Image: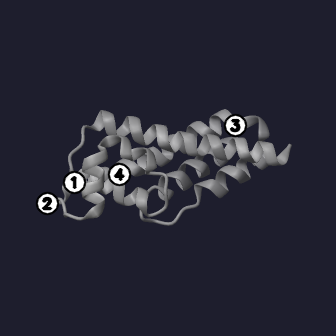
Amino acid sequence: MFEPAWLAGLFASAFLSATLLPGNSEAALLAYLHFNAQGVLPALLVVTVGNTLGGLLTVWMGRRLPKAPQGRAVAWAQRIGPVSLLLTWLPIVGDVLCAVAGWLRWPWRQVVLWMLLGKAARYLLLAFAANSIGA
């Protein structure tokens, strides 16, 4: 398959996976790496950026809500701070953390930094594991 089309599909899957919409960026990444083992770096870059931007959309939507709900997730996030966004790659929990970051109006720079690091680490580990298993 033509590589730009694969990368566009990876981006779309990663973006959707970070929202409440369905998308399976891990499967898309593994499929891409299966057919294009030399394209690890562009693939990691595309899925990380796409997934981070999808998470930032959820943060932005959280900022639009009038009042932050109180609950265990909000209390935990307040106690830990923006570093908790390292866990935004987790299913369901990650979406909640993104929304909480928006509700709490955390600074964008910190949100982007911690979210990007967490998501990049997840995809890097996945690519490493796929390479180790396939070798």
How far apart, in angstroms, are the residues tagged by discs 2 and 4?
A: 18 Å
Mark 1 / mark 3, whichever is N-terminal: 3
How far apart, in angstroms, are the residues tagged by discs 2 and 1?
A: 7 Å
Mark 2 / mark 1, whichever is N-terminal: 2
The location of residue 99, given as percent across then percent down, is: 30, 56
The location of residue 115, given as percent across then percent down, is: 42, 42
Mark 4 / mark 1, whichever is N-terminal: 4
- Tag on residue 67? 2
Q: Nearer the viewer, residue 123 or 76?
A: 76
Q: Circle 4 is placed at which residue position?
A: 57
Q: Are marks 2 and 1 in contact (CB under 8 Å)?
A: yes
Image quadrant where one finds the C terminus: top right
- Tag on residue 40? 3
**Amino acid type shown at disc 2:** Lys
- Tag on residue 103? 1
Label 1 crowd (10 A; few <14 / some 14-19 / many >=20): many
Mark 2 / mark 4, whichever is N-terminal: 4
**Amino acid type shown at disc 1:** Trp
**Amino acid type shown at disc 3:** Val
Mark 2 / mark 3, whichever is N-terminal: 3
Q: Callout 4: helix, strand or loop? A: helix
